[in-house]
Image (cartoon, rainbow, N blue to C red):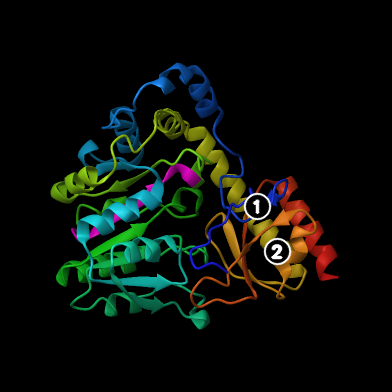
Amino acid sequence: MQRFEHGGDVYTHPGVVDFSASLNPLGMPAAARQALVDGVDAFMRYPDPSCRELVAAIARFEGVDDAWVVPTAGATDAFSRICAVVHPRQALVCAPCYSGYEQALCQAGAGVAWHDLREDEGFRVTGRLARDIVAGTDVVFVASPNNPTGLCVPRHVVRACAQRAYEVGALLVLDECFVDLSDEEGMVGLLAECPGLVIVKALTKTYALAGLRVGYVLCADGRLASRLRETGQPWAVSVPAQIAGVASLADVDHLAKSRRLVAAERERLAQALRTLGLRVLPSQANYLLLQGPEGLRERLLGQGILIRPCDNFRGLGPTWYRVAVRAPQDNNLLVEALEGVMA
C-alpha cells in the first residue's frame, strides 16, 4: 500500500459502489444543489478571498464569533497551514490515524513521535495521550471520531491534553471532520477555556462535498487565526465551494435526518457483518473498522464493491478494513457480496 493512500479512488475503479470514502449517505443537500445551479453565473468571478458569507454561516452553525473561523480548501489545507505557521520540529500523532497529519508534518520537515492506541483498549484515546505530551513537543494531532477506528475522544481527555499541550508550549489540533455525523457533540465549547486547542472541520463528509474542498479551522487565539488566514493561497476556497457551504450549513433538517440514518444503519450493518464472522469494532461514526481475511478488498472488487484496506495505517495490517455506512440499499449490497465471497 502507498504510505499516504486515501479512500475514494473511483477513478481507478469506475462503476464500483464506493464504501472506501465515508461520506454522508444522503449525499449533498438539495438546497446546496439548487444554490449551485442558481449561482452558476458567479463561477466566472474570483472568489471572495475573505469568504464573508461562508464565515458567517460557519460561525452561526458553530455558535462562535466570526473571528474564530478560518475557512480552508478542505481539512488537508487546514493541516498544511497549521504546520506552516507552527513550524514544528517535533510532533506527537495518535495511531492508527488519518495519514494527512503525517503528510503535512513531513512537508514541514517535522519529526513525528507516535502515540500508539492499544488494541486491548479498543483503540480508544485515553488519558495516556496527555502523559506523552512532553517538553519539546510543538504540535499534537488527534481526531474525534478517530479515523479509521470511529471512536470519539471523551471531553475530559481532550481538556487534559489541551491543558498539557499549553503547559509545554504545544498546540493540540483536534480533527472533528466526522463529528457532525457521529453520536457525540463537538468540543467547540472547550476553545475559550483551552488556549492550547484548535479544531479542524470540513464539510466534505458531513454534506458530501468532497469534490468542492471546503473546510475550516476554529481558533480562539486571534493572532494564530490571523496567521492561518495569511498562510493560505489567495482565493483558496472556490466560488462553488462557498455557495454550497453556505446552503448546506443552513439545512438543519438534512443534517438531523443524516445523523438518524447513520446511527440506525451503522448498528444494522455492524450486526450483519458480525453474523458473517467478521470482527467489527464499536463505532460512533459513519464508518466501521473490521477485521477479516486477507485479500477481502480484491474479492469484493470482483463484485463491484470498493472498501478501504487499512494496511497502511500504523498499528493495523492486511486483515483490517474500513467500510462506510451508506444508504440501506447499498449496505444490503455489501452484505450480499460478503456472503458470496466469505462462503
Instruction: State the residue at coordinates (70%, 75%).
Output: 294
276 left or right, relative to 121:
right
Upstream in sequence: badge 1 or badge 2: 1
- Determine the image quadrant of residue 297: bottom right
Q: Residues within 10 Å of mark 1 (few under 14, many from 20)?
A: few
Q: Circle 1 is placed at which residue position?
A: 12
Could you tell me residue 242's position as x and y percent?
Answer: 39, 31
Q: Quadrant of the N terminus?
A: bottom right
Q: Is residue 150 visible?
A: yes
Instruction: State the residue at coordinates (56%, 45%).
Output: 24
The amino acid type of the residue labelled 2 equals Gln
The amino acid type of the residue labelled 1 equals Thr
Q: CA distance from mark 1 to mark 2?
A: 31 Å
Question: Mark 1, mark 2: which one is toward the viewer?
Answer: 1
- Determine the image quadrant of residue 60: top left
Q: Magenta stretch?
A: 194-204
Residue situated in front as seen by the camera: 287 or 321: 321
Q: Is residue 154 visible?
A: no
Could you tell me residue 110's position as x and y percent?
Answer: 28, 69
Taking the magenta stretch, the answer to whether it contains residue 129 is no
| Image disc number at residue 271 | 2
Could you tell me residue 119's position as x and y percent?
Answer: 52, 80
Q: Decide: is 119 above or below 302.
A: below
